[in-house]
Image (cartoon, rainbow, N blue to C red):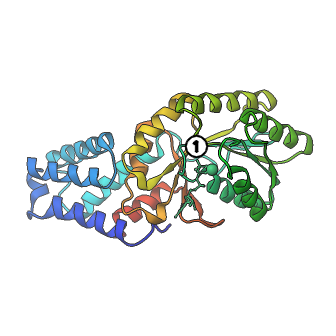
Amino acid sequence: MDLGSERPKRSFWQKVKDVALTDVGAMVKGIDEETISDLERLLLQADFGVDATMELVGELERAAKRGSVSTEEELRELLAREIQEILTGADAASPELVTPAEGPGVVLLLGVNGTGKTTTAGKLAHRCRERGESVIMAATDTFRAGAQDQLREWAERAGAEFIGGESGADPASVAYDAVEAAVSRGTDRVLVDTAGRLHTQRDLLEELQKIDRVVGRLVDGAPHERFLVVDATSGQNVIQQAEKFGEAVDLTGLVLTKFDSTGSGGSAVAVARELSVPVRFLGTGEQLPDLEPFDARRYTRELLGAA
Ligand SMILES: Nc1nc2c(ncn2[C@@H]2O[C@H](COP(=O)(O)OP(=O)(O)OP(=O)(O)O)[C@@H](O)[C@H]2O)c(=O)[nH]1
Ligand SMILES: [Mg+2]
């Protein structure tokens, strides 16, 4: 995984070291107040968010008091362990996409406008096609002009089928049609792209709940994945957005997009901590192959730099 450039991994760890290890032996004596507030500031600037920052700094402080952190390596190991714990939460080994024993696997992509839902749908379709699965892509955004064509183009690029709706049509009915078609044709996967904006945000969330319900009536357990697509460059806003969507539907994972253009890597940690939902994929560009299954160990290694 390349977190975009060399900036995030090198500068982040470099800065942590500068703060925590400048005063030779600072760790041995225990971290002083100033060091703690500097570390806090650093983690917040790197988009870790308040809760994750407090948790990490608290752990460091306790470890320093116990005398279990006195070298650079020990500091790195402790941070890596704590960050990984936040990122993976309870289920460290989720499959790439949950696949039901019977019927199509249905994936719902949701999130505010412009985060990369449609692009991610295209990339996911590509991954599924590469594995030999048949895919239907459903364009439930009947509100924004151009949304239908945009998904149709991704479907063509990925070699997937496309099902859309007339302008102003009921989004849930488009999702219904797509899943119904998949059931009757024996299609392996349905990727449901949704709108990022409707008349109001309340409409949007209610619409998503409706899509969710309608799809569940056709196939047991569907949607099997509900991915919140968040833009990794949008910093602290990410958490607020995520909370609203998380209250509306039962999220199964996060897709963090635009990792290629973020200067800091902490947002993954912030959102995972806030929602207790694992990061499942990283978007690393604008092309079909630019999607990677999330690997917490590798992510942490890159963030903190190789030894
Ligand atoms: N660099 C980069 N750009 C991305 C990535 N994912 C999406 N984008 C870009 O982000 C912009 C918005 O992407 P869309 O897929 O249209 O976003 P959306 O969430 O479907 O937007 P709405 O349908 O308006 O809600 C496009 O210019 C994409 O090319 C990514 O991982 N990296
Ligand atoms: Mg879209």
Seen in the image, is 182 located left or right of residue 197? right
Residue farthest bottom in this picture? 6
Q: Nearer the viewer, residue 151 or 33?
A: 151
156 vs 260, nearest the viewer:
156
Indicate if the residue with disc 1 has its beta carbon within 8 Å of ligand 1: yes
Which quadrant of the figure contains the C terminus?
bottom left
In the rendered image, which quarter is residue 271 located in?
top left
Figure quadrant of residue 233: bottom left
Give 145 or 149, whichever is nearer the viewer: 145
- Give the percent coordinates (x, y) of residue 186: 89, 45
**Residue occupying image coordinates x 79% and y 39%:** 101
Image label count: 1
Residue 158 visible at all: yes
Mark 1 element type: loop
Disc 1 packing (10 Å; few <14; some 14–19; many ≥20): many
Q: Position of residue 105 (x, y in %)?
A: 75, 43
Q: Could you tell me if residue 102 is visible in this image?
A: no
Does 171 sit left or right of 36 as displayed? right
Q: Which residue is mark 1?
A: 196
Q: Amino acid at mark 1?
A: Gly
- Residue 122: percent from the left, percent from the top? 68, 57
Q: Position of residue 289 (x, y in %)?
A: 64, 66
